[in-house]
Image: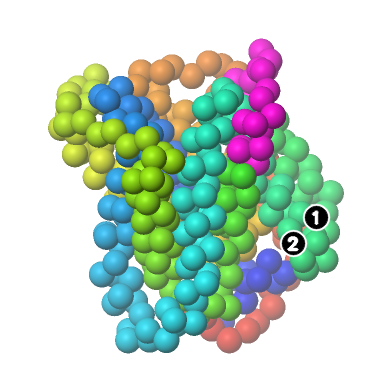
Amino acid sequence: MTAITDDTVVIAPSRIGSGLALAVVSAVSFGLSGSLAKGLLDAGWSPGAAVTARILIAAVVLAVPGALALRGRWDLVRRNLGLFAVYGLVAVAGCQLAFFNAVDHMQVGVALLIEYTAPVAVLGWHWIRHGRRPGRTTVSGALVAGIGLVLVLDLVSGAQLSLVGVLWALGAMVGVATFFVISADEDNGLPPIVLAAGGLLVGGFVLLLAGLLGVVPMTASTSTVVLAGAEVAWWVPVLLLGVVTAALAYAAGIAAGRRLGSRLASFVGLLEVVAALAFAWLLLGEIPRLVQLMGGVLILAGVIVVRLGEREVSGPPVEAAALP
């Protein structure tokens, strides 16, 4: 027996374990995207072309498994067309476009810091929408994770802000928060892989359309890409971006949200920044500073504290009908 997960009921231990594992897989997969994209950008790709290829490849990869997961229940797709549109427009395409515009006006680290305030936005959403006020332990964990995020992004030396950049970064934050909120919703009846496939398909076509209209510059190259000091064919990082950092990352992230709820899943998602730091070290030779390593430890500590806070607020597990 398991407990229904709507962020107001504790999840059964078996779902907590699998949920945390899936959330870490998602965060690590997302974290790989920066290093792979950096290699493509250095080889002549534009950010828009790289992310559009990434999203469309992911949509194609998940199309067949998504169709099989429906088991002929195509009425689920028809009933959730609006959800696919919101997910694809806001959590996929909108988030990507907003972040690209943000880094065009400000430092990448600052834009990331604003974008990754998404867990706080998720806490606020549940407070306003469901009346679930975060407890002291949860707030303490959020503060610890926030301090860790600042250290990982190495912003202690100060940075210049741009109002336009901040607004775009806040748009990206809304996209990330939307990803966690929609991903955790099981009421729509959609299997996680179906939601991921549909959202990526919508997002990919929106990004492609934005490129055709000139909103997002699209430049690709067949030059070799340097990763971990070795030259590889251009299609290697492109496929990895699509299969690992998008298809796997989105599908695992949605499945994790179903098991953990959007609040806890969003904080575990902060590990993406730590993973990005590690991959930059391994693939690009960018050695992290001591302060960044300390920040990674604080993010992990913050996630643990948030988990403890979630347990305190929810109480003991409540039995319900077994979920598929």
Q: Residue at x 57, y 51 (%)?
A: 175
Drawn side of residue 202 relative to residue 17, left or right: left
Q: For marks 2 and 1, give the one nearer the viewer.
A: 2
**Front-lying residue, 267 or 178:** 178
Q: Position of residue 203 (x, y in %)?
A: 42, 56
Q: Which residues are magenta?
A: 150-170
SS under mark 1: loop
Q: Is residue 147 at all visible to an observer of this figure?
A: yes
Q: Earlier in the sequence, mark 2 or mark 1?
A: 2
Q: Is residue 245 at all visible to an observer of this figure?
A: no
Residue identified by numbered label 1: 134
Q: Considering only vertical position in the picture, is 267 above or below 31?
A: below
Q: Residue at x 69, y 29 (%)?
A: 163
Q: Are marks 2 and 1 in contact (CB under 8 Å)?
A: yes
Say how the picture is coloured: rainbow
Indicate yes or no whether the magenta region holds residue 28.
no
Q: Considering only vertical position in the picture, is 277 above or below 317?
A: above
**Front-lying residue, 7 or 201:** 201
**Front-lying residue, 223 or 190:** 223
Q: Around disc 2, counting alpha carbons within 10 Å, would you say few (fewer than 14), some (14 to 19), or many (20 or more)?
A: some
Task: Residue type at mark 1: give it.
Answer: Pro
Q: Between marks 2 and 1, how big is the CA–CA gap?
A: 9 Å
Q: Position of residue 78 (x, y in %)?
A: 44, 81
Residue reaching furthest to the top: 157
Q: Residue at x 68, y 23 (%)?
A: 161
Q: Considering only vertical position in the picture, is 303 above or below 184?
A: above
Q: Considering only vertical position in the picture, is 4 above or below 228?
A: below
Residue identified by numbered label 2: 126
Task: Residue type at mark 2: give it.
Answer: His
